[in-house]
Image (cartoon, grey):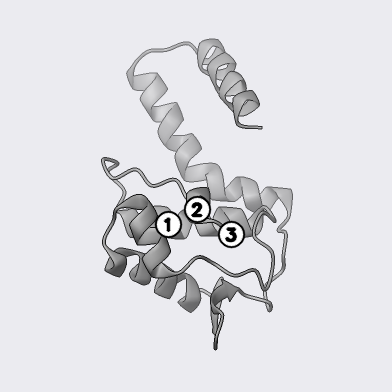
Amino acid sequence: MDASLLSIQPAASEPIYRQIVEQLRRLIAGGQLTPGESLPSVRDVAGFHAINPMTVSRAYGIAESEGLLERQRGKGMVVSTTRQATQTESHRLALLEPQLQALARHANELELPAERILRRLTKLLGEER
């Protein structure tokens, strides 16, 4: 894994360490990070994203305590080999549920029509692939 695979948004309301943990959950559940795959060092992630190394260390520690990651001597942090590599589609969709609920709430508050939101979302999903 390369440090650039993580997308950190310092101005977001969600703390950076939580952004990292959530992204790791999704990348592992989606199979983009495979069991045994090495993660970049705390120093590499912190340097690439210009964030405090303690923030990255905290995120890695949380992911390790959840069983997502494990420490291997000489390799650093790796994706846990004891977890299921790719989760079911319904489990992966459940990981998106909080963001989908927030999106729906924001769209309703802005009184935006669902069709427009869906068109824009479809376009964004197409651009990401």
The residue beneath circle 2 is 23
Q: Nearer the viewer, mark 3 or mark 2?
A: 3
Q: Distance between the residues labelled 3 and 2?
A: 13 Å
Q: In which quarter of the image is residue 7?
A: top left
Give the label, 1 or 3, closer to the camera.
Answer: 3
Q: Which residue is drawn at 34% across and 16% down?
A: 110
In the image, residue 128 sits, relative to residue 115, either above or below, namely: below
- Residue type beneath disc 1: Ile
Residue at mark 1 to residue at mark 3: CA–CA distance = 13 Å
- Can you give x and y, in whole percent of width and height, for residue 6 in the image? 48, 50
Q: Where is residue 76 in the image (x, y as percent from the top left)?
A: 51, 79
Residue drawn at x 42%, y 57% as measured from the top left: 20
Answer yes or no: do the residues labelled 1 and 2 have beta carbons within 8 Å?
A: yes
Q: Considering only vertical position in the picture, is 74 above or below 84?
A: below
**Label 3 crowd (10 A; few <14 / some 14-19 / many >=20):** few
- Mark earlier in primary sequence (1, 3): 3
Alpha-carbon neighbours of circle 2 within 10 Å: few (<14), some, or many (≥20)? Answer: some
Element type at mark 1: helix
Residue underneath mark 3:
1
Q: Is residue 92 above or below residue 34?
A: above
Q: Which of 40 and 54 is in front in this view?
A: 40
Residue 54 - label: none
Residue visible at 69% across and 49% down?
90
Q: Which of marks 3 and 2 is nearer the N terminus?
A: 3
Residue receiving disc 1: 20
Q: Amino acid under label 2?
A: Gln
